[in-house]
Amino acid sequence: MSQTCKAAVFVGAELPLEIQEFEIPDIEPGGILVKMQMAAVCGTDAHNWYNHAAPHPIIWGHENLGYVSALGAGVDKDILGTPLKEGDRILFHSSPCGHCYNCVTGLRCTNNIHYGNSSVDAPPFLRGGFGEYLYLDPHAAIMRVPDDMTNERAIVGVIGNHTVLGGLRKIGGPAPGDTVVVQGSGPIGMGALVQAKVLGAARVIVIGAPATRLALAKELGADDTIDIADYPTPESRIQRVADLTGRGPNLVVEASGAKTSVHEGLQMVRYGGKYLVVGLILPTTVEMDPSPIASKDLTVAGIVGGTIDNIIRSVTMMHEVIPYPVEKLITHQYPLADVNAALQSHVSLEAMVPVVNHSL
């Protein structure tokens, strides 16, 4: 194995990611060296590319699939007890520290390392999937990918689906037979669509654009779609949902990040319904009428990121339960040298999910 490898580094807003050389670290007991196979470009990466407050330098890539290149002493199985060896394909996530306030009260850990969102200015540098290798610290959460599962299907389990699944479990919906509206036809919206259908929703309506994405939504189980090109105003979309659903949907999932989405969603949802916010995670100011939260007796919740529990469930569902061709969400694959083109394809909406494929 070479003693150095290449990685793409975010060096500042609106600047091309730089391909830099890094030393491959020695593996400490409990650690794992991953030879990267695929790293998806997330909407967070695309937003941060233009965010002057985004921390840097960082090796991005937090939705990852790779091969075990080297196992540290004491590592011989994944979190489900499946034997683990060099050459196995894995998905991974940082483990909770177990001692911060959030951990001991059952919340999201505030101390763990976020692979793909951690600084590269101190060793070990290889923290993100946009590098040829990635170093996992001791006690990372590892899930071995089943041999009969494609790379594309496996990685989709950690692209949107695990986060939305956590949100749906948190808000307690959909119930079997419910009608669900999904605001947004990007990766998060598609994850909400797929998860809502397999959890029992009788009808799912997807609002978004462009038409190619809405066509894919149909393949992934959407019963109806609303193209924002045909319904360009909040009022027209609210009315279209009313026309399609009568009393309104039981559940609305915000997966677009659009500034009008919350106002629209609260108007759409039926009395006693539920509203889940997933897409609006970056600071922004919106205009909205909050009165329906009280006047319609709504349940409102939000979710950020995925947990190990929901990653296990999401990937297992991809392997065992979900019948839809979710592999089609991976529309573009790029070699590491073309990482900036991969980012641009996400920004322009040319790609649904672009990935850096380290075998190209």
Image (spheres, helix red, strand yellow):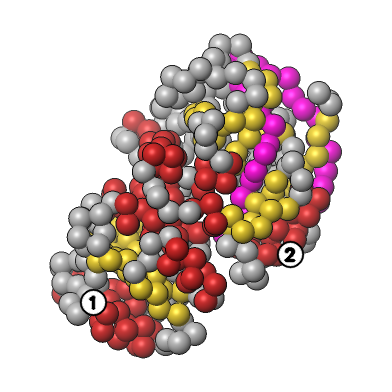
Question: Is residue 335 visible in the rendered structure shown here?
Answer: yes
| SS category of the residue bearing label 2 | loop
Query: What is the three-letter code of the residue carrying label 2?
Result: Glu
Q: Which residues are magenta?
A: 17-43
Residue 280 quadrant: bottom left
Judge left or right: residue 278 versus residue 276. Answer: right
Query: What is the three-letter code of the residue carrying label 1?
Result: Thr
Judge left or right: residue 216 versus residue 289. Answer: right
On the image, the x and y values in percent for residue 84 come to: 55, 19
Judge left or right: residue 137 versus residue 276. Answer: right
Q: Nearer the viewer, residue 345 or 301?
A: 345
Residue in the image at 53% along x and 52% along y: 327
Report crowding for label 1: few under 14, some 14 to 19, many 20 or more residues within 10 A (C-alpha). Answer: some
Residue 122 quadrant: top right
Q: CA distance from mark 2 to mark 1?
A: 43 Å
Residue 35 magenta-highlighted: yes
On the image, the x and y values in percent for residue 243 come to: 26, 84
Identify residue for label 1. 245
Q: Nearer the viewer, residue 137 or 243?
A: 243
Residue in the image at 49% along x and 71% along y: 215
Residue in the image at 55% along x and 56% along y: 328
Quadrant of image for the N terminus: top right
Q: Residue 14 bears which disc, if any?
A: 2
| SS category of the residue bearing label 1 | helix
Question: Is residue 54 visible in the rendered structure shown here?
Answer: no
